[in-house]
Image: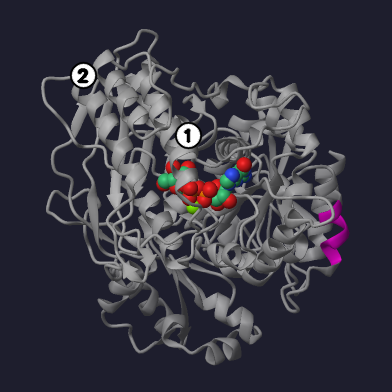
């Protein structure tokens, strides 16, 4: 996407208010070398950067008896990577709108292979859990969460926290344009890409909000927004020597926040919520009031405003709703701010009296306020919610547990870890079958012993076995080129290079393209015939490997290394390998083919992962099981190295200290190794 670059940013203490930036291009093309925060304007934000944010973002969809077709269309606009959290206050009972919403979301998620959460605001368990966590203010006398959009949003914020998300965005479910919904979620991600602070807020200005009166007329923006912006700007102008008009999104319903910020703000009830968020930021972080949060003051808070391309068309609810439910609450939160000066208060009162909203000399209504979500016992919330999340998860039975931050789970007692090679070890050297090891796999899982695959196989190939065996532990791919860790597996943060789907990836090896580039410089190979998987079709790979077409396709999806077939006699072979070395690349023999790579290191990968296990679970005892020379590095990096027999019943000759040979070819030997670990 491409966006206008920011002009003059205005400051209020630690708060940086960015002027509205227009989006110029919904799609700015595929990857071209460019710097995210380049100074040249306009700025281009890459798809990868947007996706990385969206994977960590929950989109909260508040709903109260909306048209179900519109709701369904809104769902289709939410980017796939975002986790949807629907918070509903719809009618229940004989006509059960909530049930219909659950069904629609369920069908949508099943069809699109997505997971989501849907929860009714008035769910008695939710009320009980919030009470137990000390977040009483949001509860009514009946013990249930109060009605209102803000209250629904707060439930969404709390759920996002429990589910370990980093960002939360809000999108109304009465929006008629799915393309606009999609665009909002892109804007949110762009906002967070543009901010350096962990405390950021992205607010959206609709370019057009069409009104249907005879013919379609593209009106710039609503009256309520115009008036609210005017008084928020007046408020800001009184804080400095210069008049300002910087705020154009004072009551933007479409907005997002980093959870770090969201959990620190105090909120107002009903539709005053968005204006209140801004006022809360000013009150808490401008430094004008005492008791500022030191950490936030150091990093600063970014308020980023962007203007959309799609028009905003939603359900119109009449002037009365606009004035009474929206304008009065919005202005009330400005009026009642302890930072608001008398001049601004007078203007607001006068305006509302003139509009007939409050009587002359009447009191300005005061909204109910909710304390920052972080004042609730969020750890307790997470562990209590642990028991109920499955009831709110869609599709039914989705194992939400894995999404919970590890801190919220009971610490599993990991004391032993098994690293294992796949081909020829867990998988039979000839049949590729793991059948003989299946019982032992289950026993290790019951004993909570992680099974860490460490093999030349690609991520796609290993995923197949992980899924079939129900293995959920980290894994090492392409001969140590990368360590793949399921998000939320470890409690403590660690450095990673990339996010792929639900995984953090620590890369040690050079990317495939670079390996291929170097192979192009390959000199004289002394008559040997070299063939690379990258040059073969899936059918050809299937033929030479005896893998089925699906697995052959996965085997071709190499990200860090290339597989070479080298044909010729011994002399040819040596010349070819010397030529490969001459390009600066390394190679290893996997039994049939050669893996050519740079930087990958099975031993280093095992050591890094062992450190992560130790950091999170205390001291752990490690074993590794392998069958061939390319397992040497893995075997030398653990407490107990074990070797299984090859297809011919012999053990490979390896240079590994204290190597224990176990009887059994491939998976049979693996089973014995597992028993040693279980009983040892
Ligand atoms: N969970 C929940 N609970 N959702 C609610 C409730 C409630 O009590 N009341 C309304 N909603 C949902 C609606 O179904 C809709 O999806 C969304 O909240 C917004 O409500 P609307 O009634 O459509 O509000 P609006 O269109 O007048 O105002 C919107 O835009 C304003 C300007 O941007 C809202 O988003 C305002 O908050 C915003 O200030
Ligand atoms: Mg609406």
x and y percentages locating residue 213 in the rendered image: 37, 66
x and y percentages locating residue 271 in the rendered image: 49, 37
98 vs 237: above or below: below
Main SS category, magenta section: helix
Left or right of 420 on screen, residue 219: left
x and y percentages locating residue 281 in the rendered image: 37, 26
> Mark 2 = which residue?
239
Question: SS at mark 1?
Answer: helix
Q: Range of the magenta residues?
A: 436-442
User: Looking at the image, which residue is at 81% across and 56% down?
Assistant: 441
x and y percentages locating residue 456 in the rendered image: 56, 65
Closest to the observer, 601 or 275 = 275
User: Looking at the image, which residue is at 74% across and 44% down?
Assistant: 389
468 vs 248: above or below: below
Closest to the observer, 346 or 612 = 346
> Mark 1 = which residue?
273
User: Looking at the image, which residue is at 30% across and 52% down?
Assistant: 221
Quadrant position of the N terminus in the picture: bottom left
Q: Is residue 611 magenta?
A: no
Q: Is residue 441 magenta?
A: yes
**Mark 1 CB in 8 Å range of ligand 1?**
yes
């Amino acid at each position: 996407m491409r966006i206008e670059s920011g002009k003059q940013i205005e400051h209020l203490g630690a708060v940086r208010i960015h002027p509205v930036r227009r989006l110029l291009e919904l799609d700015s093309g595929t990857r071209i070398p460019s710097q995210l925060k380049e100074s040249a304007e306009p700025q281009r934000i890459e798809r990868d950067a947007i996706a990385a944010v969206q994977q960590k973002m929950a989109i909260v969809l508040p709903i109260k008896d909306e048209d179900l077709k519109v709701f369904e269309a809104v769902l289709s606009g939410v980017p796939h990577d975002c986790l949807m959290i629907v918070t509903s206050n719809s009618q229940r009972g004989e006509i059960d709108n909530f049930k219909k919403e659950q069904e629609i979301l369920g069908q949508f998620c099943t069809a699109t292979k997505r997971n989501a959460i849907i929860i009714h605001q008035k769910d008695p368990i939710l009320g009980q859990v919030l009470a137990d966590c000390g977040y009483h203010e949001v509860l009514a006398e009946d013990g249930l969460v109060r009605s209102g959009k803000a209250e629904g949003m707060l439930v969404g914020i709390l759920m996002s926290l429990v589910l370990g998300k980093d960002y939360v965005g809000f999108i109304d479910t009465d929006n008629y344009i799915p393309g606009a919904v999609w665009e909002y979620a892109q804007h949110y991600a762009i906002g967070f890409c543009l901010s350096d602070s962990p405390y950021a807020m992205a607010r959206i200005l609709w370019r057009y909000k069409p009104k249907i009166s005879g013919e379609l007329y593209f009106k710039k923006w609503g009256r309520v927004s115009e008036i609210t912006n005017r008084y928020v700007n007046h408020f800001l102008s009184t804080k400095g020597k210069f008049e300002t008009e910087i705020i154009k999104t004072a009551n933007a319903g479409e907005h997002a926040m980093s959870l770090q910020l969201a959990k620190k703000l105090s909120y107002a009830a009903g539709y005053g919520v968005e204006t209140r968020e801004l006022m809360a930021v000013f009150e808490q972080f401008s430094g004008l009031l005492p008791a500022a949060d030191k950490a936030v003051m150091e990093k600063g808070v970014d308020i980023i405003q962007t203007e959309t391309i799609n028009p905003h068309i939603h359900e119109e609810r009449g002037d009365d709703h606009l004035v009474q439910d929206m304008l009065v609450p919005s202005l009330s939160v400005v009026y009642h701010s302890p930072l608001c000066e008398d001049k601004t208060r007078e203007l607001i009162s006068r305006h509302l009296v003139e509009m007939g909203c409050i009587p002359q000399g009447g009191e300005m209504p005061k909204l109910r306020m909710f304390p920052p979500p972080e004042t609730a016992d969020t750890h307790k919330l997470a562990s209590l919610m642990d028991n109920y999340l499955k009831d709110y998860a869609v599709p039914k039975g989705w194992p939400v547990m894995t999404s919970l931050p590890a801190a919220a789970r009971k610490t599993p007692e990991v004391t032993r870890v098994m690293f294992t090679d796949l081909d020829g070890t867990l998988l039979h050297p000839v049949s590729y079958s793991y059948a003989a090891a299946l019982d032992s796999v289950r026993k290790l899982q019951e004993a909570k012993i992680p099974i860490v695959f460490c093999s030349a196989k690609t991520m796609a190939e290993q995923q197949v076995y992980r899924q079939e065996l129900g293995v959920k532990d980290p894994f090492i791919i392409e001969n140590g080129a990368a360590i793949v860790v399921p998000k939320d597996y470890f409690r403590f943060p660690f450095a990673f290079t990339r996010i792929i789907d639900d995984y953090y990836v620590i890369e040690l090896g050079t990317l495939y393209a670079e390996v291929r580039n170097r192979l192009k410089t390959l000199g004289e190979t002394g008559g040997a015939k070299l063939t690379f998987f990258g040059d073969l079709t899936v059918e050809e790979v299937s033929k030479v490997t005896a893998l089925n077409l699906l697995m052959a396709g996965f085997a071709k999806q190499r990200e860090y290394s290339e597989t070479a077939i080298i044909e010729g006699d011994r002399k040819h072979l040596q010349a070819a390998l010397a030529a490969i070395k001459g390009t600066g690349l390394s190679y290893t023999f996997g039994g049939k083919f050669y893996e050519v790579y740079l930087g990958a290191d099975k031993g280093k990968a095992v050591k890094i992962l062992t450190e992560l296990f130790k950091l999170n679970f205390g001291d752990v005892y490690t074993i590794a099981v392998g069958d061939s020379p390319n397992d040497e590095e893995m075997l030398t990096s653990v407490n107990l190295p074990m070797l299984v027999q090859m297809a011919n019943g012999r053990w490979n000759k390896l240079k590994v200290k204290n190597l224990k040979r176990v009887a059994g070819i491939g998976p049979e030997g693996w089973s014995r190794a597992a028993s040693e670990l279980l009983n040892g």
